[in-house]
Structure formats: structure tokens, C-alpha cells
Amino acid sequence: MHDQPHVSRREFFQRSGMGFGSLALAHLLSGDGVAAGSAPHFAGKAKHVIHVFLNGGMSQVDTLDPKPELTKRGGQMLPFDNLQTERKTGVALPSPFKFKKHGESGIPISEIFPHLSQCVDEMAVIRSMHVELPNHEMSLMLMNTGDLRLVRPSLGSWLTWGMGSENQNLPGFIALCPGGLPVGGAGNWRSAFLPGVYQGTYVDTSKTDPKQLIEYAHNDRLTTQEQKSQFDLLQTLNARHLSNRPSETALEARIRSFELAYRMQVEATDAFDVQQEPKHILELYGDGPQNRQLLMARRLVERGVRFVQTWHGKMQPWDSHSNINASHRKVASECDQGLAALIIDLKQRGLLDETLILCTGEFGRTPSVEMGTNGTGAAQGRDHNHWGFSLWLAGGGIKGGTIYGATDDFGFRAVENPVSAHDLHATMLHLLGMDHERLTYRYAGRDFRLTDVYGKVIQEIIA
Amino acid sequence: MLNRRRLPSTLFGAVSLIFAFQACVGFAAEVRFNEHIRPILAEHCLHCHGPDAGDRQADLRLDVEGAAKESAIIPKKPHESEFFLRITSKDPDLRMPPADTGKSLSIAQIALLRQWILNGAPFQDHWAFEPIKKPKRPKVGNTTTTDIDRFILAALKTRGLNLAPAISKQQLIRRATFDLIGLPPTWEEVTAFVNDTSPQAFEKVIDRLLDSPQYGERWGRHWLDIARFADTHGGSAIGFKKFPFSYTYRDYVIRALNADLPYNRFVTEQLAADQLGLGENDPALAALGFLTVGMQFRNPHDTVDDQIDVVTRGLLGLTVTCARCHDHKYDAIPTDDYYSLYATLGSSRLPQLLPIIGQPPETKSYLDYQSALSHRQEEHDNMSREQSAIMQSRLRMQVSIYLRELAKGTPEQDLSTTFLSYRTDDLRPLVLNRWRTYLASLSKNDPVFGPWLRLSLLNSKTKFREQCLELIESLIKENGDATKQPAMEKLTAKAPRWNPRVLEAIAKQKPASLLEVADIYGKLFTDVHQQWLNVLMGTSLEARIGTKVVPDEDSRHRDANSPINRQLRRHLYAPDTPTAMVEEVAVKLLNRPIRDNLVGRKGSIHNLHLTSPGSPPRAMALREEKQADEFYVFRRGNPIDRGKPVQARFLTALSTSGTNPFPIGKQRLGLARSIIDPSNPLTRRVIVNWVWQHHFGLGLVRTPDDFGTRGQQPTHPQLLDYLATMFLEEGWSLKKLHRRVMLTDVYQQAAIENSESHIKDPENKLLWRMPRRRLEMEAMRDSMLLISGELDTTMGGRPFNLLSKPVVPRRSIYAFVNRDILSSMASTFDGANPNACTAKRPETNVPQQTLFALNSGFIQDRAVALASLKEIASAKSDAERVELLYQRTYSRSPEPQELKLALGYIRSQKEKSKTNPWQRLAHVLLAANEFVFVD
């Protein structure tokens, strides 16, 4: 007999949409039980990522980076030429929000995140992020793919390629966004030169019927019984076909894939059905699509999905060019409860240690007021600011209660321990057990990396 | 896998094991440089010891024989060769490759290197750069076999292998039909072939398929993968997303392949159709889409980079774009070569209005389109012209903003990454660059800017004011006595050597820094511009009818006639000055609301091209600019760090007779001719390999877009050269090549496993069986539509939406391709990446694919249509119905057992349902492996 698989293990993983580090399928293939959970380069704490994207750009001085000096000088020009951003900005615009220190670590968070502020001891806040340009699309590409101009695979694609999915019945990389696409569209979760299966699967979370959420996961024309007997016939024919062509791995693989798909119909629908949660969990997360999709994200990582990205909404909801007070208050209130609930819920299930949460925008906002086309700052908004901004991480091996880096006295530019998108990516890969310099993919004669030739792991935020 | 990583560290230094290894492998004399040694060097050594002079370590180069043998390698003496000592050293600080590269040599590799040195360390040129020579046909017994089979059999024989048995005629015609037209044969075609007992039966089938217009649709799709074809601009493009005319390139490709346009001509047209002296409406101009349908990047550097990539990787199998930032690490592609190609391609632009293909008939819709076009164009042009004039006029009032930046020493900015929302008072980086370049081009004796240039050289820290005044005083002296001059309104008046208004202003203001000088110049130019506007106003008013004539040299014309003012105005209005610009440039600088409005007007023209029923097809052509910019090497790829100037010319490594610059005005044609030159060792090898790959699933070179050092060796080097030779002899005909390849035993053998052969050659490199092929997305979809009787065979034209409901039953090649958002069908089924040249699609096997087969509306709708076809629905019996379904779907009749299964299934199903059992059976047949995999 020669029924050994005729492809290398590595090749098989890659073709199956499993990462070469993945072990679930190794088990399936060889039957020689291999312990699950080891990562390709070294033991990493995190196994999953939930990437919360506050698209449009969260203002650091109104959320995570309080600046008393800005308040003091409200209405005056800053003591330096305002840095160039997309639009002209004028005098210092103090934050309309109050800050208070929270938790044992005493990390200050503004009043627009009343729930999240209760979780600061789990969070590491980076206050010295910076990107290269004050332009949404390019900064989104940089934060998601590590390159602002060229077509490169996204972070989620790299991870699912590198680690595979733990659950063959669900896609390894899922992007949730209610109501439409963010700026840059599917470019934010594209696989570029990595095989197409590693691109994010987009799910519109404004839909509520879980059967409608994933394409082809449900057959609405056949009864369960009809489908069962049809499926049996299909696999019988496939088996006959195979018996005339023995040992054909490709044929065997598709037969197995049919079995997986058949089971997936049930599981996929389940995974997205937040209504199956008990009442107290639903109440913990709160209502609205932003909170609900965070709960969905938990259900997904719980089932082994590698990378879930949740977008606040279509286009750029955090882009508060006018009335920072009302607009930031509104968007924060839409996700605050869910973000806190996510941390609490993962923790009570023992999943926080293995789930890395990243919450960020593509850049921050200016501490100075944006001058409208009429040349005044009457609209009380803030422009894009790529010179300095804040984000937070939690779980997955992150040292909670940490503040890393700082901006200048006004929150304009990162001055202490500046962190680039590449540093962030390198750190995330590290937490997942991967060396960003060794996670490479050969394409067009070159070994590509997520971090290109840059990136430094920030040890200070790692537990 | 994890174990493999650990292996070297545990065994390192165990040289005795190397001997043991050698002893059991017994390859002593057989080590060949290209096959064994070069890949090791490429993978482990050349990154730091290769062609890239910039990163070369220890001044050691291992890819060139002379350099390697200067010190590192002593032939026949491995243990005296530093190279060998270092790769076997136990000292981690000395051992190569260094641990931090994460690379290490295996025992087997070290053994190979050792044996190679013992053999004298012979080098060979990389096989792919060697000239193509017609090889001798190997002798294989007495068989009257084809030349191709001789090469295949000879290689198989060396390993004691043989071909698999031939497949049945039913299977053969199905394989050939999928291969050539991407669709299954009809049952009539199958029976005709089976019943045709003539020796030419299969040849006739091949000829029929090659003559079918559907051949171009099948192979055109393969070519569009290479051409990274899409119907949208992609990613970071601001504004319009869809190409209105990408379809004309797609249709050109289909036409060219159907006509069997010789491949050398096909390449030439795609690179330089506009330089072949064709008519201005020649359909072949659409070929240039090969260069122009790529992603539209925000800056020209990336767009040209994409063109270089598609030309080099797609046509030459070389990865040249690595050399954008540094000399290629592995192949002989220096950075200079990259920028020579940059100069070749970067000097061309799309014309403003693309050429119409052919002569559109004067239908009403065409006339409507034309009148709407001229109306919208007029609306746009009028606004553009006026706003551009206002923009330039404003810039002339703002000279000080720019001179101040230069005085501050602000470094040059890469414009490709600027994206700003301008107001009137904002600095425009593009204008700053223009001032920077302009001032740098002026002589220090320029009457107006001479003082500025001299003052810029002063040390601004110490006594700027004193030095400045000293200089100005001396210049005033040089000017001499001005009183002898005629009055300034006289046309004979002459300006002194140094512009007195400049000198006066500086002398009066006594600036303490260059910044203050900038303000003085700025103020002066503001005055000059205002005066000039007044001059225009005043002199115009004099021309009003009935106004008393003012003599030309009247004192009222002093400002107008003054040569001193003219000296100044020259720097604001002459065509080469920073603030005098063509409209195209000026409109980029407009304030945001105005620019948005103008962009909207351009958008309405674009939409007209895109959607008007009368919009005629146009070619996405290119035109070489008459006065192209000069091109330079960009150091480390940085466009503002310019190195030496470059000329448009071909790659050094592929130029047998020197690299002469391409002729101006026909640079792309020069490139095309270098590519198709019969002496070019790559072009023909790459294309014949591509054809082979699409017949066998794998190429003779399995890295079809990398024939370089890091690519794989050909499995049959002589066969590859044989095919390349015959291809030239047969006039670069692709159709003749298909015939030659398909009329062989190796093509007609079965796709079945053989465990003995498998052990000897697990990767089937020697082709002891036909690899099993899976239908690509397009072939799968199109075949389902054909079988269900729905396929619409209309050719060409604007794209349709692949996912529209109800389905548009046209062939998939005509579906709209969104570069950013691949249709779920394309991404699920490994469609080509439309952002870069794809020589080989990935092959994945994910549950989403089988979910599609189980649940998609598409497959179920096809099943409904198939089961409802008249010939099937009206069958005399259930058994006949099953028989007809099988014949139509699988090109064969069901076996008795299969018939029984199907009938059993039908009988077991209750009739009361949304769907009928025959539809569900048809669905099973379309979903099953037999449909998706070709024997």
C-alpha cells in the first residue's frame, strides 16, 4: 500500500490555508498526536489577536494622553510653529473632557471611556506612536500592512499564514465592520502576494441574521434531510472516483474539505450568533453594533479564529474635524462598554492571557484647533496628527498598567521612546511567538517581511 | 520541520559524518556547479558575498570565479580554503553563515561543497544566461517517437522509470479541450473523436480547438495573469477608480492569440505599438495596455517600478525590481540597469485623450457622446485655465515663503508622498522644489539673484550684516554711474550689471540674516508683480476706442519699458521660472475646494467614457515625451537622493553586443527589440516554459518568473532549449508549439500514481505521470455554464459583474476585475493577484471552496438549468436521463454501478420539495471531484 500523503507537510499546510506552524491539521494528517499550541519560532503567549480599529483617528489628548499645558494655554498659539498636518491648524484647543487616574496603576483616562477606565490595570498605553503622513488611506495601509504605498499583505494575513487557524471550520482571519467598508476597503485586510485564502473575510455586522453573515455557509433551498442525502451521494461518487485513481492527494484533500465544509455550516452560523449568549453577557457588552461585534470577536477567538479585526464603522467615524466634544463623546460611547466587557469577559474565561487586544486609530489628532476653509477655528475640531498619538494593548502577554513613551507638553509630537508601526508589528509578532525578522515569504525572488527592514520589539510593555 | 532547524547545530563540526554521507551517496565525480553548488551559494552566501557591491562583506565575492579563487577557495584543497574552514568552524564567531542570519548549511550541503572544491571548484555561468543552442536529440531505442518524447524518455531511463500508460480517447479529448479552450467537449465531439480511427484523429481535434475563438479566451486569461490585468486603478489612487478602456487591452490579447500573432510581434506591440508607425487609430495600439493597466500609484516611481516588474519578470523571468534600492543580491543586475529601464519607461505618458480604435460609426449614441464630451471638456478646460492663471499669479505674490524655506535650509521633500489640503496661504512643496532647482541653475552673475546666491554662501552666524553690506556696496560700485543712462521709458535704455532695485532694497534694510534677505526679495517681487498687473491694466485702458493715444516712449510707460524691471520680471514670467508652469502642474496646487470641483469636472468626462453607450473603444496608449526629464539613479531608491545620470538602455547581463542607448523617440521599441532578439537567452525559454506549464500544470522550470540564480534549475534543460529553438524556427508561433507539445506520449499519458516511480521521483520532475489538474475558477465557472446550456459566447466589450444576479452567463475573462476587492469567487478559487505579474497561481484547498460547491446559488442555479434542459427533461426513461446527464457533465456514460446509485437516489427522494430530485442530482455531478479535476 502506498497511501502516504504525497506532499510535504509544509506544502500541505500552505495549500490548506493552514499556517506551517499549525498543528490541528498535522494531527488530522498523520494521526500522530502532536501537542497543540507551539509557535514557529519560540513560545509566545498570545494565540489570537483582536484588533479594534477606531478608524478615522482617535484624539490622544482627549482620551489617553492628558496635557495640562494645553489647557493652560487654551486659545493661544503654541510656543512653536504648528507641525504640518493635512489642514492648517491654529491655537491650542484644550480637551473638553475631564481626566481621572484609575486602578492601581493610576493610568489617567478621560471621562468618555467610563467603562474602559475600570480596566487600566490590564492595559499598556503607548503614548508615543507616530506614522509618516496625515492621510487616512496611507496611514491605514501602514498600520495594517507595514507599507503606505505598495501592495503588501496585512498583519492578519501574515499571522494566519504563519500560524494557521486553530479551527478549520472557520476562516482564520475575519474583519468585522458594520454598515460598509472603511476607507481603503478590503486593502486593509488583503493578502497581496500571500495566497488568497489568507486574506480577511469581511463580515457586515449590521446584519443580524447569523446565516447571512458568511457567504455560502448556509443552504436556504434544501432541508437538512435533503442536504444530508445529497451529501451522502456526493461523497459516495467521490469515493468511487478516488478508488479508480488511488493515492491522489488532491482528490483526497477535496473529499476531506467537503466534510469540513459540511460541519462548518453549523459551526459558522453558531459562531456569529451572539443571541446564544446568556443575558448577563449580553448586558455586560451592551447594545449597538460596535459592542455586539466585540462580543462576536470573543466568540470567534474562543473558537480558534486567529485574527479578528473590528472596525468602528464604514468610512472614518473617528475623524472629528469639527466639534471634538460631541463627536468624540458619541463614538466613544458606542464602544466603551464593549471594550471593557471584552477585557473582563476574556479574563473570566481564562482567555485574556492568550488573546492580544490592540486598540488604535490610523493616527491621532492635533492638539491645536483646525482652521476651517473660512480661516477660523470656530468648528472646534482637530486635524489628523501623524506626529504623535496613543493606542492601547491588553492581554496576550502585555504588561498591564504600563504607560510607554510620551509626546511633548502639548501632545503634538512623540518625543520620548517614539514607536513606529513597524515597532508595533514587531512587538505583536513577538507576543505571538514569532521573530519578525524570520517570518519571511519568498515572492518575486525576494524574502519579504511584515516589517521590511525595520522594527524593534518594545520589551518594556511585555510582561 | 522544527527538527530540521535544529539539525545543523547538533551535528556541526562533525566532519566525519560528512565523509560518511559522501560514502553512502557516492556522488564524488558528479557535483555540478549550476545544479548543486550555485543554489547553495545563492541561498546562504551571496546575500553578503554576491553582486551587490553596497552590502558586500569582507570584500569577498563568491559568485565570480576569479574573485572567489583569489583567496577564499583554493581548488582541490578544501582544508586550506578559508571558505571551507569557515563553513565548518566550531567557533560560532567564525562560522558561516553567521547564526543571526538564521541560515545554516546541512551536512549534505557541506559535503557537496567539499567535493566541489576537491574537484577543482569549477564555476559555470548561470544556465539561463547561456545562449540557447539546439541540442542533439537523444537516442531512445528504435521507437518512432517524437523529439519531445525522446528527451523525456532519456531522462526517465536514467532513473529506471517509464511513462504511464496512455489515457483513453474519451479522457484525452476532455483533457485537450479543457487545455486549449477552458471548456469540456460536447458529447458529439467526444463520440466523433472516439469513432475517428484515422491516425490524424487527435491532430484534427487539436486543430479544431486551436481554430476556435474560445482558444484566445482561454489562453488570453493566462496571459492576463502575467499582465496583472484589472479594470480599476487600485489602492491609493485618488479620484477615479475604474479604467474605462482596460477592456480594449483584454480584447487585443484575445484577438492576438486567436490570430496566432508571432510572439515576437506580440511582445513588440505590447511594449511599443505606438512606435511602429501604425495608423493613429490602429487597433494594435490597445496592446500598450500591457504597460498601462497596472496599479495607478500616487507617484510615478512606483508606477514605473510596476512596469519594470511586469516587463522583466513577465517576459524575461528575471526579478529586476530588487535593484531599485541596491544591486541585485543574487543576479547580475546592478542598480544602474534598473534606472536605465526606468528611463526607458518613465519617459512615456498616457496621452490626455486616448486614441479611438478604428472609425466609430456615426450613430446617434456616438454623436450624443461626442457632443456631451466636448461640452464637458469645455467646462473643465475653462475652469482649469482660469484657476491655473490665478494660482500662478498668487504664487508670484508669495516668493518670500519659498525663499525663507531655502534660507532655513529645509531639505528637499519627496513629492510623491505629499498630500495636502491647501489654502491660499499654504506653502506648496512642489513650488519649493521648483525654486530650489531654479536658483541652483542660475549663474552667480545673475543680475537679480546673483546677490542672493553670494549671500547664501555667507556664514550666517557671524557678522552677517557687515559682510552683506560690504558685498552690496561693492556691487553698487561695479554698477558705476547710472546718471548717464537714457530715461527708463526709452526703449534704448539699458539695465546695469546688477539690478539696482535689489541692491537698494538690501542696502536700505540692512538684513541680519539670510531669512531677512528672503523677505526683502519677497517684498520686491510682490511689488514687481503688482506693478506689472498695473502696467497691463494701464496699457490696456489706453487701447480703449476713443482714448487719446499715448506715445510708446511716454514717461507713463516707464514701469512697462524699464529694463531694470524687465530683469526682475524675467524671474516671474519667463517659461522656465518657478511660478510659470503648465496648466497641468498649476492645477495640482489649487486650494482644496477648487481642486475638488475641478476633479469633479474631470470625473464627469471620465464617467462619460466609462458609461456612455456611444463612448467608442480607445487604446490605453503611451506616448514618449518629446522633452523628457533627465533620469538619474536614485540612491537606495530614494527619489530625492540622485546619483549619476542614466540613459535608456537594456540590461547589461543580457546585452551580448554592448549596451547602446535606445534611440530617442523609440526607446520602448529599443527595449522590445532587445527582448525579442534571438540572441536573448531568456525570452524564448520563458515563453515556452509558460506554455509547457499550462499544459502540464508545472513548468520545466518550476519558478516561471525567476530564471535567476535563486530560481529552480530546469528539470529538462535540453528539452527547454529544444522547444526554444523550434519556437524560433517555426516563426514564434504559439499554436505550432501547442501542437508540438500535445502530440506527444508524455502529454497523452495517464494521470495516475505509481508507487515505485513515486519513491524514485516524488516530485514527478521527470514526468513519469501526467500531473492532475484542477479547473481554475474561470474554467470551472464557464464549464458549468456550458453544461447547463446557458453559456453566452459573445466576445469582447465592456466588462460584466461576475456576481450579479441573475447571472450574466458570459465567459469569466470578460468579468470586471476590481484590483482592490477581488470578487469572492476569485479570492476563494485562487484567482490571479491583479496587483502584480502572476506567472503561477497559488493552489489552495479550503473549505470555502467546497462550501461554494455545496451551497452557492450559482451552482444550484446551473443545476436547475441543466436538469431542465429539454433533451434531459424529455428523456424516455430515468436511466436515459442519468445517462444524458453523465455524458453532458463528464464526457462519458455512467457505469452500471453509478447508474444504480443515481436511480436509487432519485427514488429515495420525496417529490414534495422546493427543488426536484433531478436538480439535486445535477448539483451533485457539478460539485463532485470528477467535475473539478481533469484526468
Image (cartoon, rainbow, N blue to C red):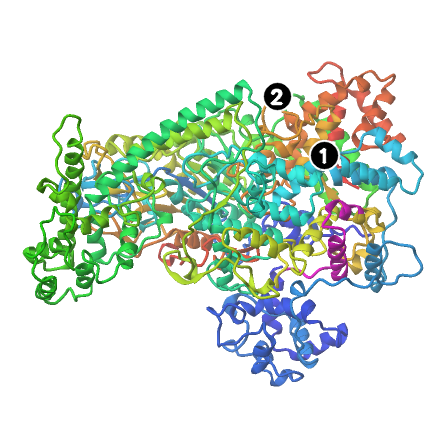
- Identify which amino acid the numbered label 1 is placed on: Gln
Percent from the top left, x then y, of residue B870?
Answer: 79, 17
Percent from the top left, x then y, of residue B451?
Answer: 17, 60
- Frontmost residue, A205 versus B676: B676
Q: Hey, which quadrant is residue B72 in on the image? A: bottom right
The disc at residue B214 is 1
Q: Hey, which quadrant is residue A324 in on the image? A: top left
Instruction: Judge whether residue B732 is colored magenta.
Output: yes
- Identify which amino acid the numbered label 2 is placed on: Pro
Query: Mark 2 or mark 1, which is nearer the start of the sequence?
Result: 1
Instruction: Tell which subunit mark 2 falls on.
Output: B
Instruction: Tell which subunit mark 1 falls on.
Output: B
Instruction: Sort mark 1 into few (<14), some (14-19) or many (20+) by Cα contacts within 10 Å.
Output: many
B355 relative to B715 in the view: left or right: left
Pointers 1 and 2 within a single chain: yes
The disc at residue B99 is none
Percent from the top left, x then y, of residue A93?
Answer: 19, 39
B304 relative to A319 in the view: left or right: right
Q: What is the secondary structure assignment of the residue under circle 1?
A: helix
Residue stretch in magenta: B711-739
Count of number-bearing discs: 2
Q: What is the secondary structure assignment of the residue under circle 2?
A: loop
Q: Report which residue position mark 2 lands on.
A: B806
Residue A308 visible in the displayed image? no
Instruction: Sort mark 2 into few (<14), some (14-19) or many (20+) by Cα contacts within 10 Å.
Output: few
Please identify the dominant SS of the magenta region: helix
Residue in view at x 14 percent, y 56 percent: B517
B789 lies above or below A456: above
- Frontmost residue, B203 versus B493: B493
